[in-house]
Image (cartoon, rainbow, N blue to C red):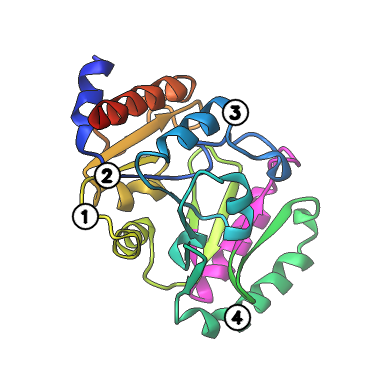
């Protein structure tokens, strides 16, 4: 069945992928996060045949050293794109800096959140987003977290929760998402043909809806989650799936 499905992908002209929970594990500390070697190797091979782009809520300075197989990156939920040494930053971001400072001041004063990692997502010299990450702490005070979410909403921020994931992300209320990121990357990379997108959470839905080949990555944190995908691949089978895709791309050359 998988072989039959892979044959549908002969015309794929680019591979776009999410990072956390898709090509990198969720349940590791931030500093240890990276794609497992079998996945990294297959993506590096695939990049010789089609361009790869990473689309993530993480910032570019985090992603780029961990994803050397990619040609382009859409970072911080689409607020920054880096490609071929060029940087593209959303023009509305500067006016959100004061609100970011206010939100960070409140977060840092909440005693119940001490020990929780506050990720500051940098976009050049600007703040593009915040992440509240309790992976290393193991748990979080739900009431304190909800207090921060309410305040962020009052300031106009967009808060993204991920079912089963031990972190949330907070972004400016700018009309960008992963669907916007796909469109921007298509334009900047000059992609004319079908695109495959791999993702694992609700945040990936806008991207999945605008590509020709949406692929879902299944793991224990998203069991039962419905996404608009044409195929689910279990995380343990991802290297095999990528190898099938690689074989299909090679067969086009010969």
Q: Nearer the viewer, residue 124 or 201?
A: 124
Q: Residue at x 74, y 40 (%)?
A: 136
Element marked by disc 1: loop
What residue did someone put label 3 on?
Answer: 37
Q: Residue at x 20, y 49 (%)?
A: 193
Q: Position of residue 76 (x, y in %)?
A: 52, 61
Q: Quadrant of residue 131?
A: bottom right
What span is colored magenta in the figure?
A: 130-159
The mark nearer the N terminus, 2 or 1, is 2
Q: Residue at x 69, y 48 (%)?
A: 141
What residue did someone put label 2 on?
Answer: 13
Q: Is residue 22 visible?
A: no
Other residues around mark 4 within 10 Å, as few (<14) / some (14–19) / many (≥20): some
What residue did someone put label 1 on?
Answer: 192
Other residues around mark 1 within 10 Å, as few (<14) / some (14–19) / many (≥20): few
The mark nearer the N terminus, 2 or 3, is 2
Other residues around mark 3 within 10 Å, as few (<14) / some (14–19) / many (≥20): few
Element marked by disc 3: helix
Q: Is residue 158 left or right of residue 247?
A: right
Other residues around mark 2 within 10 Å, as few (<14) / some (14–19) / many (≥20): some
| Foreground: disc 4 or disc 1 | 1
**Image mark for residue 97:** 4
Q: Is residue 188 visible?
A: yes
Give the CA separation, mark 2 to mark 3.
24 Å
Element marked by disc 4: helix
The mark nearer the N terminus, 4 or 1, is 4
**In what quadrant of the picture does the N terminus appear?**
top left
């Amino acid at each position: 069945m998988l072989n039959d499905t892979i044959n549908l992908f002969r015309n794929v002209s680019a591979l776009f992928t999410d990072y956390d929970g898709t090509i990198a594990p969720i349940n590791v500390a931030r500093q240890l996060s990276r794609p497992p070697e079998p996945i990294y190797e297959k993506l590096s091979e695939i990049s010789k045949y089609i361009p790869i782009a990473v689309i993530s809520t993480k910032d570019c300075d985090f992603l780029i050293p961990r994803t050397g197989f990619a040609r382009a990156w859409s970072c911080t939920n689409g607020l920054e794109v880096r490609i071929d040494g060029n940087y593209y930053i959303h023009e509305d971001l500067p006016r959100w800096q004061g609100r970011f400072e206010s939100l960070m001041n409140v977060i840092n004063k909440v005693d119940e959140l001490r020990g929780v990692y506050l990720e500051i997502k940098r976009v050049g010299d600007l703040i593009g987003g915040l992440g509240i990450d309790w992976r290393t702490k193991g748990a979080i005070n739900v009431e304190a977290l909800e207090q921060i979410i309410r305040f962020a909403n009052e300031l106009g921020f967009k808060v993204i929760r991920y079912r089963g994931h031990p972190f949330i992300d907070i972004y400016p209320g700018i009309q960008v998402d992963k669907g916007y990121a796909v469109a921007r990357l298509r334009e900047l990379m000059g992609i004319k043909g079908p695109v495959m997108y791999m993702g694992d959470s609700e945040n990936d839905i806008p991207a999945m809806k605008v590509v020709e080949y949406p692929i879902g990555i299944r793991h224990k944190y998203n069991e039962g989650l419905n996404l608009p995908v044409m195929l689910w691949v279990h995380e343990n089978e991802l290297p095999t799936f990528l190898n099938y895709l690689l074989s299909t791309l090679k067969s086009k050359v010969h």
